[in-house]
Image: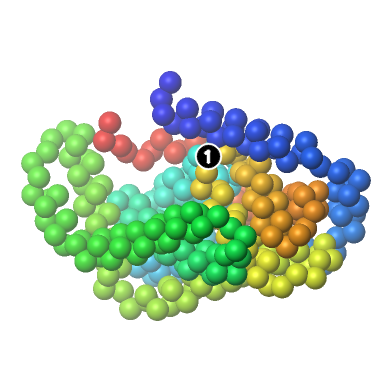
Amino acid sequence: MNKKKLLIIFGILFSIVLLVIVFSKLDWQTFFTAIKTINITKVLLAGLVVMIVIVLRSLRWNLVACMPLSEFKHFWQAANIGYLGNIIYPARAGEVLKIVAINHFTPLTLGRSVSSAVLDRILDMIVIGIFTMLVLWIHGNRIDPNVGKSIVVIFILAIIGLAMLIAFADYLYNKIQGLSVKGKWQKFQELILHGIEGVQTFRHTNNLIIVLLITFSIFLLDYFWMWQIISAFGWNLPFEAGLTVGVFLLLSISLPSAPGYVGVYQIACVLALGLYNIDQSLAVAYSIVLQLVSFTVMGIQGGLVTIYCSFNLSQEHKLPTSD
């Protein structure tokens, strides 16, 4: 059994354990009462904001890839396919699917498709680090300090990694180009070289400030719609509560889990809202509504795009490896 299958099995078992822990202590009467009393208008507003966030993420990826805005449609389509893949498949397979999709929809080489997606993700890691440190500052006396140290380390590594990747792109390109390889390794060499070309192109872009502004806007809008759902339950909590939920979720979905992050979503919301003394049963109800809103938007958009483009969701294997 290969590592990927073991990771999938572990993720599913991990999700099951989390669900058992969460639902074993659930007060079902409190849970259903909370669901019945939510404000539907605010939930629909949250769904609209999720759609806007996907548009902004697609635009940012378009700019990071240094492609003309006429290609935006394809970046939006690929992003939606990726989100759908993350809902259906475990181990964040959607990240691979969106790379395959953008490579299929645009003139980008596979290497540049990969590098643009990696740069896009590094930008996320940097901004996540900033907002995570803000949450640690707000709730510092109630969160394990070791967690804070780990996040700071990841944040610093992300910045150093991006800086070194950009600074040494030319050196890496020349070194790898100078290697004498044959057969399947030659294809792998070409993939890496195309990827570095993408980094070199991004280094000379004039869109860096715009990309950073879009990134911060994406995260603020994410926290806003999560806060709107908090408000839909009638809880009078500050905006920082949405920020806290968002940070806990982003950190938790990096863990192995079942498709759709089942279980992980629930435990993250319970822990985050517990800092505001929200009952566990209410927090679970909130997590389910939160998950339904995001997955409904992503599922419908991703499904329609997949059908419209006749895209095969089993194309993850098309990314070449060095094996």
Counting from the top left corner in percent of width and height, residue 301 is at 63, 54
- The three-letter amino acid code for the residue at tag 1 is Pro
Q: Residues within 10 Å of mark 1 (few under 14, many from 20)?
A: many
Q: Which residue, as the protein is rendered here, is positioned at the far top?
A: 1
Query: Seen from this angle, which residue lies furthest front?
Result: 141
How far across and down, in percent of the image, does residue 43 sit?
A: 77, 63
Considering depth in this image, is 62 or 290 the residue closer to the camera?
Answer: 290
Image-quadrant location for residue 229: bottom right
Query: Could you tell me which residue is drawn at 51 percent across and 72 percent down?
Result: 216
Between residues 124 and 110, which one lies in front from this camera angle?
124
- Residue in the image at 44% along x and 31% along y: 4
Q: On the picture, is 92 further left or further right than 246?
A: left
**Residue carrying label 1:** 256
Label 1: which secondary element: loop
Q: Is residue 188 above or below residue 153?
A: above
Question: Residue drawn at (87%, 55%), measured in percent from left and top?
Answer: 34
Q: Is residue 42 visible?
A: no
Residue 192 higher or lower than 23, as above or below = below
| Residue 303 shows up from this direction | yes
In the rendered image, residue 113, in percent from the top left (x then y), is placed at 36, 54
Using the image as rendered, state which of residue 106 and residue 82 is in the foreground: 82
Q: Is residue 117 left or right of residue 92?
A: left
Q: Position of residue 277 (x, y in %)?
A: 76, 59
Residue at left offset 19%, top offset 37%: 185
Q: In this image, 48 relative to 212: left or right?
A: right
Quarter of the picture containing the C terminus is: top left
